Protein backbone atom coordinates (compact mmCIF):
# COMPACT_ATOMS: atom_id res chain seq x y z
CA UNK A 1 0.00 0.00 0.00
CA UNK A 2 2.90 2.37 0.68
CA UNK A 3 4.26 1.66 -2.77
CA UNK A 4 0.86 2.38 -4.32
CA UNK A 5 0.63 5.71 -2.45
CA UNK A 6 4.13 6.76 -3.49
CA UNK A 7 3.54 5.87 -7.15
CA UNK A 8 0.38 7.97 -7.12
CA UNK A 9 2.08 10.89 -5.36
CA UNK A 10 5.05 10.72 -7.72
CA UNK A 11 2.73 11.29 -10.66
CA UNK A 12 0.80 14.14 -9.03
CA UNK A 13 3.55 15.71 -6.92
CA UNK A 14 6.90 14.87 -8.53
CA UNK A 15 8.74 17.63 -6.62
CA UNK A 16 7.35 17.00 -3.13
CA UNK A 17 9.77 15.69 -0.48
CA UNK A 18 8.54 12.67 1.48
CA UNK A 19 10.04 11.23 4.66
CA UNK A 20 9.72 7.52 5.35
CA UNK A 21 10.57 5.55 8.46
CA UNK A 22 10.96 1.79 8.56
CA UNK A 23 13.02 -0.31 10.92
CA UNK A 24 14.34 -2.25 7.91
CA UNK A 25 16.66 -0.01 5.88
CA UNK A 26 16.41 -1.92 2.59
CA UNK A 27 12.63 -1.43 2.55
CA UNK A 28 13.19 2.33 2.48
CA UNK A 29 15.69 1.85 -0.33
CA UNK A 30 13.03 -0.03 -2.31
CA UNK A 31 10.66 2.91 -1.85
CA UNK A 32 13.36 5.37 -2.93
CA UNK A 33 13.55 3.49 -6.22
CA UNK A 34 9.82 4.18 -6.65
CA UNK A 35 9.92 7.87 -5.67
CA UNK A 36 13.29 9.64 -5.98
CA UNK A 37 12.42 12.30 -3.39
CA UNK A 38 11.85 9.81 -0.57
CA UNK A 39 14.28 10.36 2.30
CA UNK A 40 14.87 8.02 5.21
CA UNK A 41 14.06 9.20 8.74
CA UNK A 42 16.41 7.91 11.43
CA UNK A 43 13.62 7.61 13.99
CA UNK A 44 9.84 7.63 13.78
CA UNK A 45 9.67 10.93 15.67
CA UNK A 46 11.65 12.55 12.83
CA UNK A 47 8.51 12.29 10.67
CA UNK A 48 6.79 14.91 12.81
CA UNK A 49 7.68 18.22 11.23
CA UNK A 50 5.42 21.22 11.71
CA UNK A 51 1.81 20.51 10.65
CA UNK A 52 2.66 17.51 8.48
CA UNK A 53 0.51 14.57 7.42
CA UNK A 54 1.91 11.34 8.86
CA UNK A 55 0.55 8.24 7.12
CA UNK A 56 0.70 5.17 9.34
CA UNK A 57 0.67 2.15 7.04
CA UNK A 58 1.56 -0.35 9.74
CA UNK A 59 -0.14 -3.26 11.57
CA UNK A 60 -3.16 -2.30 13.73
CA UNK A 61 -1.57 -3.63 16.91
CA UNK A 62 1.34 -1.23 16.37
CA UNK A 63 -0.91 1.76 15.66
CA UNK A 64 -2.58 1.53 19.08
CA UNK A 65 0.74 1.08 20.89
CA UNK A 66 2.98 3.69 19.31
CA UNK A 67 6.37 4.67 20.69
CA UNK A 68 6.00 7.30 23.44
CA UNK A 69 8.66 9.56 21.92
CA UNK A 70 6.85 9.51 18.60
CA UNK A 71 3.49 10.37 20.21
CA UNK A 72 5.08 13.22 22.16
CA UNK A 73 6.82 14.66 19.09
CA UNK A 74 3.64 14.23 17.10
CA UNK A 75 1.51 16.19 19.57
CA UNK A 76 4.00 19.07 19.67
CA UNK A 77 4.15 19.33 15.90
CA UNK A 78 0.38 19.84 15.41
CA UNK A 79 0.48 17.18 12.70
CA UNK A 80 -2.33 15.01 11.37
CA UNK A 81 -2.23 11.33 12.25
CA UNK A 82 -3.48 9.40 9.18
CA UNK A 83 -4.28 5.78 10.03
CA UNK A 84 -4.53 3.36 7.11
CA UNK A 85 -5.41 0.31 9.21
CA UNK A 86 -8.68 -1.29 8.15
CA UNK A 87 -9.89 -2.62 11.49
CA UNK A 88 -9.04 0.14 13.98
CA UNK A 89 -12.04 2.42 14.50
CA UNK A 90 -11.82 6.18 14.77
CA UNK A 91 -13.38 5.88 18.25
CA UNK A 92 -10.65 3.53 19.46
CA UNK A 93 -7.90 5.69 17.99
CA UNK A 94 -9.37 8.79 19.64
CA UNK A 95 -9.62 6.96 22.96
CA UNK A 96 -5.97 5.89 22.84
CA UNK A 97 -4.76 9.31 21.59
CA UNK A 98 -7.39 11.76 22.91
CA UNK A 99 -5.57 15.01 22.09
CA UNK A 100 -4.39 13.99 18.64
CA UNK A 101 -5.78 15.03 15.27
CA UNK A 102 -6.72 11.74 13.60
CA UNK A 103 -7.99 10.87 10.15
CA UNK A 104 -8.78 7.29 9.30
CA UNK A 105 -8.32 6.25 5.68
CA UNK A 106 -9.21 3.04 3.91
CA UNK A 107 -7.49 3.17 0.51
CA UNK A 108 -7.14 0.65 -2.27
CA UNK A 109 -4.22 -0.25 -4.48
CA UNK A 110 -5.54 1.82 -7.39
CA UNK A 111 -3.88 4.86 -5.81
CA UNK A 112 -0.97 3.94 -8.09
CA UNK A 113 -2.95 4.67 -11.26
CA UNK A 114 -4.59 7.80 -9.82
CA UNK A 115 -7.94 6.01 -9.80
CA UNK A 116 -8.20 4.82 -6.23
CA UNK A 117 -11.22 4.86 -3.95
CA UNK A 118 -10.66 5.98 -0.37
CA UNK A 119 -13.08 6.04 2.55
CA UNK A 120 -12.27 8.49 5.32
CA UNK A 121 -13.35 9.62 8.78
CA UNK A 122 -11.94 12.38 10.99
CA UNK A 123 -12.19 12.86 14.74
CA UNK A 124 -13.37 16.08 16.37
CA UNK A 125 -9.81 17.37 16.84
CA UNK A 126 -9.41 17.78 13.07
CA UNK A 127 -10.49 21.21 11.85
CA UNK A 128 -12.32 21.81 8.60
CA UNK A 129 -9.17 23.45 7.19
CA UNK A 130 -7.02 20.48 8.25
CA UNK A 131 -9.35 18.02 6.54
CA UNK A 132 -9.69 20.12 3.41
CA UNK A 133 -5.91 20.31 3.06
CA UNK A 134 -5.58 16.52 3.34
CA UNK A 135 -8.41 15.84 0.92
CA UNK A 136 -6.94 18.33 -1.57
CA UNK A 137 -3.62 16.46 -1.32
CA UNK A 138 -5.24 13.10 -2.04
CA UNK A 139 -7.89 14.09 -4.57
CA UNK A 140 -5.60 13.80 -7.64
CA UNK A 141 -4.99 10.11 -6.92
CA UNK A 142 -8.30 8.88 -5.51
CA UNK A 143 -12.04 9.33 -5.20
CA UNK A 144 -12.77 10.27 -1.58
CA UNK A 145 -15.92 9.12 0.23
CA UNK A 146 -16.75 10.13 3.80
CA UNK A 147 -18.15 7.42 6.08
CA UNK A 148 -20.77 8.54 8.60
CA UNK A 149 -20.09 5.74 11.07
CA UNK A 150 -17.73 2.86 11.81
CA UNK A 151 -20.47 0.49 10.60
CA UNK A 152 -20.65 2.24 7.23
CA UNK A 153 -16.86 2.34 7.09
CA UNK A 154 -16.58 -1.43 7.53
CA UNK A 155 -19.54 -2.28 5.30
CA UNK A 156 -18.41 -0.20 2.35
CA UNK A 157 -14.73 -0.84 2.96
CA UNK A 158 -15.05 -4.53 2.23
CA UNK A 159 -15.81 -3.65 -1.37
CA UNK A 160 -13.71 -0.51 -1.90
CA UNK A 161 -10.45 -1.67 -0.35
CA UNK A 162 -10.77 -5.32 -1.36
CA UNK A 163 -12.62 -4.55 -4.60
CA UNK A 164 -9.63 -4.76 -6.96
CA UNK A 165 -8.93 -8.29 -5.73
CA UNK A 166 -12.56 -9.40 -5.54
CA UNK A 167 -13.55 -7.99 -8.92
CA UNK A 168 -10.44 -9.48 -10.53
CA UNK A 169 -11.37 -12.87 -9.08
CA UNK A 170 -14.91 -12.55 -10.47
CA UNK A 171 -13.60 -11.73 -13.95
CA UNK A 172 -11.09 -14.58 -13.72
CA UNK A 173 -13.87 -17.00 -12.86
CA UNK A 174 -15.91 -15.70 -15.80
CA UNK A 175 -12.97 -16.54 -18.08
CA UNK A 176 -12.90 -20.08 -16.71
CA UNK A 177 -16.66 -20.63 -16.89
CA UNK A 178 -16.99 -19.14 -20.38
CA UNK A 179 -13.82 -20.85 -21.64
CA UNK A 180 -12.04 -17.59 -22.49
CA UNK A 181 -8.30 -18.31 -22.74
CA UNK A 182 -7.01 -16.12 -25.57
CA UNK A 183 -5.48 -12.83 -24.39
CA UNK A 184 -7.24 -10.79 -27.10
CA UNK A 185 -10.55 -12.27 -26.03
CA UNK A 186 -9.75 -11.44 -22.40
CA UNK A 187 -9.06 -7.84 -23.42
CA UNK A 188 -12.52 -7.68 -24.98
CA UNK A 189 -14.05 -8.79 -21.67
CA UNK A 190 -11.96 -6.27 -19.70
CA UNK A 191 -13.19 -3.47 -21.95
CA UNK A 192 -16.78 -4.66 -21.64
CA UNK A 193 -16.47 -4.63 -17.85
CA UNK A 194 -14.78 -1.22 -17.83
CA UNK A 195 -17.25 0.36 -20.22
CA UNK A 196 -20.23 -1.05 -18.33
CA UNK A 197 -18.93 0.49 -15.09
CA UNK A 198 -18.39 3.78 -16.92
CA UNK A 199 -21.94 3.65 -18.23
CA UNK A 200 -23.33 3.08 -14.74
CA UNK A 201 -21.28 5.99 -13.37
CA UNK A 202 -21.90 8.42 -16.21
CA UNK A 203 -25.61 7.72 -16.70
CA UNK A 204 -26.53 7.43 -13.03
CA UNK A 205 -28.74 4.48 -13.93
CA UNK A 206 -29.22 1.56 -11.56
CA UNK A 207 -27.91 -1.91 -12.45
CA UNK A 208 -31.52 -3.10 -12.80
CA UNK A 209 -32.19 -0.35 -15.35
CA UNK A 210 -29.16 -1.29 -17.44
CA UNK A 211 -30.16 -4.96 -17.27
CA UNK A 212 -33.63 -4.07 -18.58
CA UNK A 213 -32.01 -2.24 -21.50
CA UNK A 214 -29.96 -5.29 -22.46
CA UNK A 215 -32.09 -8.28 -21.55
CA UNK A 216 -34.74 -8.97 -24.21
CA UNK A 217 -37.61 -11.27 -23.25
CA UNK A 218 -36.55 -14.86 -23.82
CA UNK A 219 -33.08 -13.79 -24.94
CA UNK A 220 -29.57 -14.88 -24.04
CA UNK A 221 -28.98 -12.13 -21.46
CA UNK A 222 -32.23 -12.95 -19.68
CA UNK A 223 -31.21 -16.61 -19.47
CA UNK A 224 -27.91 -15.61 -17.85
CA UNK A 225 -29.58 -13.13 -15.47
CA UNK A 226 -32.09 -15.74 -14.30
CA UNK A 227 -29.26 -18.18 -13.58
CA UNK A 228 -27.33 -15.43 -11.77
CA UNK A 229 -30.38 -14.64 -9.61
CA UNK A 230 -30.58 -18.31 -8.65
CA UNK A 231 -26.93 -18.79 -7.75
CA UNK A 232 -25.14 -15.51 -7.00
CA UNK A 233 -26.95 -14.38 -3.80
CA UNK A 234 -25.75 -17.39 -1.80
CA UNK A 235 -22.25 -17.08 -3.27
CA UNK A 236 -21.86 -13.36 -2.49
CA UNK A 237 -23.50 -13.73 0.95
CA UNK A 238 -20.88 -16.35 1.76
CA UNK A 239 -18.07 -14.07 0.59
CA UNK A 240 -19.37 -11.15 2.65
CA UNK A 241 -19.88 -13.29 5.76
CA UNK A 242 -16.40 -14.77 5.41
CA UNK A 243 -14.90 -11.27 5.27
CA UNK A 244 -17.01 -10.14 8.25
CA UNK A 245 -15.72 -13.09 10.26
CA UNK A 246 -12.11 -12.23 9.42
CA UNK A 247 -12.65 -8.56 10.24
CA UNK A 248 -14.12 -9.46 13.63
CA UNK A 249 -11.19 -11.76 14.37
CA UNK A 250 -8.76 -8.93 13.65
CA UNK A 251 -10.71 -6.46 15.80
CA UNK A 252 -10.71 -8.88 18.73
CA UNK A 253 -6.93 -9.10 18.53
CA UNK A 254 -6.49 -5.39 19.18
CA UNK A 255 -9.02 -4.78 21.96
Image: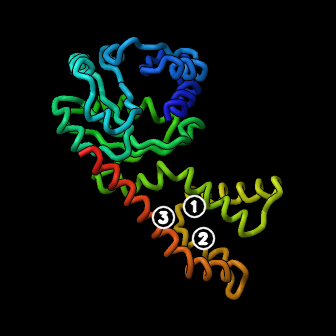
As drawn, is 52 to the left or to the right of 22? left
> Which structural element holds mark 1?
helix
234 to 164, vertically: above or below: below
The residue beneath circle 2 is 210
102 to 27, vertically: above or below: below
The residue beneath circle 1 is 200
Q: Are marks 2 and 1 in contact (CB under 8 Å)?
A: yes
Q: Residue at x 41, y 52 (%)?
A: 157
> Which x, y percent locates residue 228?
59, 77
Cα distance between the residues tagged 3 and 2: 25 Å
> Which x, y percent locates residue 27?
52, 22
Q: 193 or 140: which is nearer to us? A: 193
The residue beneath circle 3 is 239
Q: Earlier in the sequence, mark 3 or mark 1?
A: 1
Q: Residue at x 45, y 70 (%)?
A: 237
155 to 96, vertically: above or below: below
Label 1 environment density (alpha carbons within 10 Å; few <14, some 14–19, many ≥20): some
Q: Are marks 3 and 2 in contact (CB under 8 Å)?
A: no
Label 2 environment density (alpha carbons within 10 Å; few <14, some 14–19, many ≥20): some
Q: Earlier in the sequence, mark 3 or mark 2?
A: 2
> Which x, y percent locates residue 1?
50, 36
As drawn, is 143 to the left or to the right of 186? left
Cα distance between the residues tagged 3 and 1: 24 Å
Cα distance between the residues tagged 2 and 1: 8 Å
User: Which quarter of the figure has residue 104?
Assistant: top left
Nearer to us of marks 3 and 2 is 3
Amino acid sequence: MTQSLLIGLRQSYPDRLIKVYNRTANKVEELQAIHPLVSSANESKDLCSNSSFVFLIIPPTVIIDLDADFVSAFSKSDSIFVSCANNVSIDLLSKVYPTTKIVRLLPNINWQINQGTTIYQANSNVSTNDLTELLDLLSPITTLVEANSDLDFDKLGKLTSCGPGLFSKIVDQLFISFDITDNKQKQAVYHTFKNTMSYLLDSGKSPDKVISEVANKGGLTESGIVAADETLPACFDYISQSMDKRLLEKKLLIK
